Amino acid sequence: MRIAVTGAGGFCGGAVARRAAAGGADVVCLGRRPGPVGEHRRWEATREAPDLAGVDVVLHLAAAVGDGGDEEAFRAVNVDGTRRLLEAAAGRPVVWVSSASVYRPGPYAAPVREDHPTDRQRTAYGRTKAAGERLALAAGAVVLRPRAVYGEGDPHLLPRLRRVVRAGRAWLPGPDVPLSLTAVGNLASACVAAWQWPPGAYNIADATPYGRDAAVRAVLGVPVRHVPVALARAAAVASRTLTPYAIDQVTDGLVLDIGRARARGWVPAEGLRTS
């Protein structure tokens, strides 16, 4: 089995490439930078089609990510790059890694299933990931929707959380809420299994949701204190250390229902120790 992993030079793509190689696959890493294993084929998603010669399965993790930025730059990768990839895949199984950011913003009264609306996103990232996954779903791909992927080498979630630490405490907006997180190992195990699943969208997260405050204490190792949400938003605008979207992420209480992926036999084996 020869598996192509796009974005294998990044945090999530690298974890997926290593998992695929550990399972015995020949891995082709597609992207600007080499991946941690296998063959490297350079791919500039904004300009060209990927070289998928000899590839059996495609796991697509290359993406433009971030809370802010130029919408057209996000679209060039997350939408136009997706279109090029799907055309090149030409009937091969494709697993397209999306994000829970495609879901309509909360707050949420119950766990979110895959049929929750995917509109009204507040960021260019969310809007372009939603547009890209519509292309993937129309092409018969399996779409995975993880939330807040974390793990060793995480370049996004942990640095964002560290911005709320002052004087040895994590200052979080509003009351404690439940939320889903996704260990990068759980995302990797889902990716290497999902090419055999029926096409469609699947939520991917750790086995059980966490209390926000307990998760932050476990990750940062500092006590948690609360501040009013309105004050946190005003401070974020003034200091530019956090975006409104980042505040939404820790106040909206988004818990993913992962029953659909579990029904395919997937088991999320990793998680945080919060006690």
Image (tube, grey):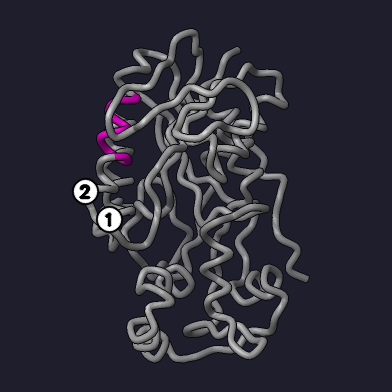
Give coordinates of residue 240: x percent, y percent. Answer: 37, 78
Q: Residues within 10 Å of mark 1 (few under 14, many from 20)?
A: many
The quarter of the picture where residue 194 lies is top right
The chief SS type of the magenta part is helix
Q: Amino acid at mark 1?
A: Ala
* Residue ID for mark 2: 72
Which residue is outermost to the top? 54
- Name above or below for residue 10 compared with residue 157: above
Q: Amino acid at mark 2?
A: Glu
Which of label 2 and label 1 is nearer to you?
A: 2
In the figure, 81 relative to 159: above or below? above
**Among numbered discs 2 and 1, the one appearing first in the sequence:** 2
Membership of 79 in magenta stretch: yes
Q: Quadrant of the C terminus?
A: bottom right
State the residue in front, 244 or 113.
244
Residue at the (63%, 36%) spot, across then down? 189
- Is 70 rendered above or below residue 162? above
- Residue 124: image tag: 1
Instruction: Where is residue 26? Give x, y as percent.
Output: 63, 16
Give the camera-side residue of 60 and 199.
60
Asked whether 145 falls inside the magenta stretch, the response is: no
Examine the rendering and report whether any part of residue 146 can be seen: yes
What range of the chain is rendered magenta? 77-85
Residue at 40 percent of width and 27 percent of height: 43
Q: Dot 2 surroundings within 10 Å: few (below 14), some, or many (20 or more)?
A: few
**x and y percentages locating residue 8 in the rendered image:** 54, 34
Q: Residue at x 72, y 75 (%)?
A: 221
Residue 259 seen in render = no
Q: Is residue 237 left or right of residue 39?
A: left
Among the 4 quarters of the image, the one containing residue 80: top left
SS at mark 2? helix
